[in-house]
Image (spheres, grey):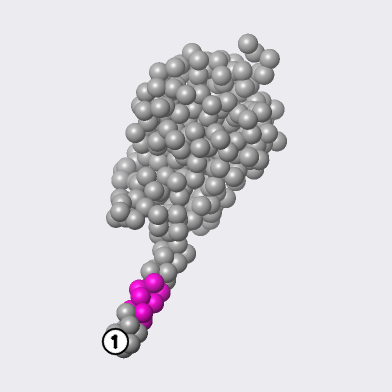
Amino acid sequence: MRKFGKIIKGSFVIIITVLLLSTLCIRFSRYTDTIIYKTNDVGYDTLKTVFTYEEYYFKMDDHTKIHGVLFKTDTIHSKGTIFHYAGKGMHLQTSLKYYKTLLSRGFQVFSFERRDFGKSTGSADNSRILKEDALFVFDEIIKHEDVIDKPIIIWGQSLGGAFAVMNAAERQENIRGLIVEGTFSSFPDIGKVYANALHLENFKWIVPLLMNNDFPAEKEIKRITKPVLIIHSTVDTEVPYVLGKKLYEASNKSNTEFWKIQGKHIRGIFDYEDEYIKKIEKMITPNTN
């Protein structure tokens, strides 16, 4: 009986050890980073648009160039620049529909594509490197003659909201405010929602242990003292409303507004166009009523 007990105990120790080592291996290999940023979109060869624009390629290393575009208004002077972080599957060609309203209302828009997406090269398998890319591109574009000395608002949608919060926290001295829509509180939180991607739908509790949280939006948003607008639909089926609300609860209430809307994921600028623009204009010019 004692021998049997030792066998059971030994087997338990082995199982726990294997699980622990497997968890550490997945986490430190950044396997989940690859899953997060991987997309099946085939991209495009040439940007097709009626908008006026300037195209850029930022060289990060010998194997990586980041593709970015500054879309310009048809007016002589823009009201300011919207620095856009798009969602998971949104490269610049698919993001154009979101810019039409902004450009027609006098805002120019800048956005770029992360590594291995759209017309950017390199490998998107490490969140820390993608964070460095984002800050580098931001620092470069704000020197542009059409951007410098004009108001800047960072706008993030869905996955892009994680980048937007980080950028705003790191460079808030350069911006007027931050807007995020359909964004989650942290990667571990959204990871539990999409646990089936890791075949762990029955073991959601383990997902936070597997994921690196290099964009801890809940923590980063506390650092921001500039105006913040968090937008989330109560019927969002891609990023649950509760995660947007959780992000708001972590923010500084003195400078943060939570706008509860209805409709599909990140459709606010289409469903609430006038109100959306008014909120942007108020952020650009605080005294605007």
Magenta range is 9-18
Viewer-proximal residue among 91 and 280: 280
Circle 1 residue = 1
Q: Amino acid at mark 1?
A: Met
Identify the residue at image location x=53%, y=37%. 247
Q: Is residue 19 visible?
A: yes
Magenta stretch secondary structure, dominant: helix
Left or right? Give the position of 153 relative to 236: right
Left or right? Give the position of 79 relative to 70: right
Left or right? Give the position of 24 relative to 107: left
Please provide percent x and percent y for residue 158: 44, 36
Viewer-proximal residue among 137 and 234: 234
Q: Is residue 121 visible?
A: no
Please provide percent x and percent y for residue 117: 40, 45
Label 1 sits on a secondary structure element that is loop
Q: Quadrant of the N terminus?
A: bottom left
